[in-house]
């Protein structure tokens, strides 16, 4: 497989993981708005901190693989719109889904995030950042846990 094809495949995997993680994550975000009338600070920080590196990594890989900036922007715009729709759906549907359904959505989002981390982001972080990538990941988890 050529270098450009690998870059495109890796970036596409990040985008797919972001969607698989972001849609349920946004659904839970909307549900938390309904339950608590506000989004907890820990959730906002964790969503931002987890999604920005995913987006940057995916974007740089797609650009290096030959995607145009316009195509990348359209693709991310679609992801954002889908996430907003999922947030509104979570807000509207929370009362209609059973408790187990909400737990399934949360577990699905967590599983999608773990797959993307293990398959794409961690190997890239280790390759580019060295051994410190593991420590930074653990510290990031600790900060997120502390905020909650």
Image: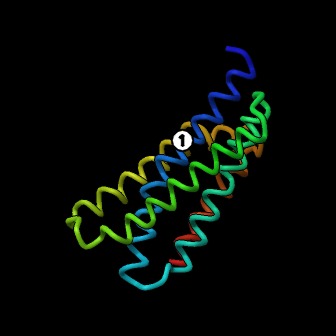
Q: Residue at x 50, y 77 (%)?
A: 148
Q: Is residue 133 left or right of residue 118?
A: right
Pointer 1 local density, CA inside 10 Å: few below 14, some 14–19, many at least 20: few
Q: Position of residue 128 (x, y in %)?
A: 77, 41
Foreground residue among 33 and 92:
92
Q: Say which quarter of the image contains residue 52.
A: bottom right
Foreground residue among 125 and 75:
75
Q: Is residue 86 above or below residue 37?
A: above
Q: Is residue 69 left or right of residue 93?
A: right
Foreground residue among 81 and 101:
81
Quarter holding the N terminus is top right
Q: Residue at x 67, y 44 (%)?
A: 74
Q: Residue furthest bottom?
A: 37
Q: Position of residue 3 (x, y in %)?
A: 75, 20
Q: Is residue 120 above or below residue 105?
A: above
Circle 1 SS class = helix
Say how many tags the image has.
1
Q: Position of residue 134 (x, y in %)?
A: 64, 51
Q: Position of residue 63 (x, y in %)?
A: 78, 35
Q: Say which quarter of the image contains residue 127.
A: top right
- According to the image, label 1 marks what residue? 118
Q: Say which quarter of the image contains residue 144.
A: bottom right
Q: Residue at x 34, y 70 (%)?
A: 92
Q: Is residue 64 left or right of residue 5?
A: right
Q: Residue at x 29, y 56 (%)?
A: 104
Q: Is residue 102 above or below residue 72?
A: below
């Amino acid at each position: 497989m050529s270098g450009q094809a690998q870059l495109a495949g890796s970036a596409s995997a990040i985008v797919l993981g972001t969607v698989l993680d972001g849609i349920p994550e946004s659904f839970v975000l909307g549900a938390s708005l309904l339950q608590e009338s506000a989004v907890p600070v820990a959730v906002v920080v964790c969503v931002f901190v987890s999604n920005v590196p995913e987006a940057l990594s995916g974007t740089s890989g797609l650009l290096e693989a030959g995607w145009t900036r316009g195509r990348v922007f359209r693709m991310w715009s679609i992801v954002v719109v889908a996430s907003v729709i999922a947030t509104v759906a979570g807000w509207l549907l929370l009362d209609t889904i059973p408790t187990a359904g909400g737990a399934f959505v949360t577990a699905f989002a967590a599983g999608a995030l773990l797959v993307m981390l293990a398959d794409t982001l961690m190997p890239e972080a280790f390759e580019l950042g060295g051994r410190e990538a593991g420590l930074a990941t653990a510290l990031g988890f600790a900060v997120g846990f502390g905020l909650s």
